[in-house]
Amino acid sequence: MGFLTELLAIQKKEHLTDKEIATKIGCSRQLYQMTRTEKIPLGFKILQGAVRTYPELQRSAIYLWMHSANKTTETADQRATTYLTPHNGQHGVFGYFLRVRDSVSKFLRRKAH
């Protein structure tokens, strides 16, 4: 199951409206609804808020990030470094995913040799 599918399952299980789940994860109803209906791609704000609110989504988020690693553009990678810059002493969820992805990639490369 994909990240967004799991988030939608949680929404349904908890009987939350778009506004209620958007408030829980820290985004606007409009942003959540446009992401849910796939009018816009899943962004950092929803990803970060959902993982903070629902830690059980971490595995899906890591899987999503690892499998989209080859599809990122230079612009996306440049934006990624922005999220790695500490804000109030924290690197944030996005930085965490980057570090996990890099660690797993290194491990798999060593295992292959």
Image (spheres, rainbow, N blue to C red):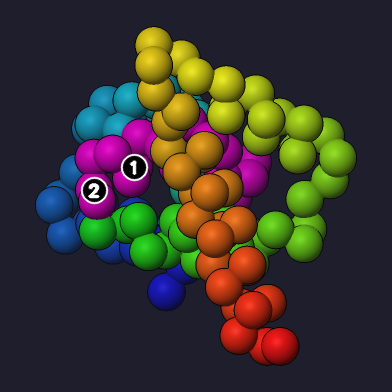
Q: Is residue 64 visible?
A: no
Could you tell me the amino acid type at mark 1?
Answer: Ala
Q: Which stretch did the figure color magenta? A: 38-55
Return the residue at label 2.
Answer: 54
Q: Nearer the viewer, residue 86 or 45?
A: 86
Which mark is drawn over residue 106? Answer: none
Vertical relation: 58 (above or below) 29: below
Could you tell me the amino acid type at mark 2?
Answer: Tyr
Q: Is residue 88 visible?
A: yes
Q: Residue at x 24, y 51 (%)?
A: 55
**Does residue 67 appear left or right of residue 33 in this picture?**
right
Residue 28 in the image, given as x and y percentages of width and height: 41, 23
Which mark is drawn over residue 50? Answer: 1
- Image quadrant where residue 34 sits: top right
Vertical relation: 101 (above or below) 93: below
**Is 43 a magenta residue?**
yes
Q: Residues within 10 Å of mark 1 (few under 14, many from 20)?
A: many
**Is 91 a magenta residue?**
no
Q: Residue at x 32, y 57 (%)?
A: 57
Q: Residue at x 64, y 41 (%)?
A: 40
- Image quadrant where residue 105 sits: bottom right
Figure quadrant of the N terminus = bottom left
**Does residue 3 appear left or right of residue 67 in this picture?**
left
Q: How many marks?
A: 2
Q: Nearer the viewer, residue 12 or 95?
A: 95
Asked whether the residues under the numbered discs 2 and 1 touch, taking CB atoms below 8 Å apart as contact, a structural biologist would say yes
Q: Nearer the viewer, residue 37 or 44?
A: 44
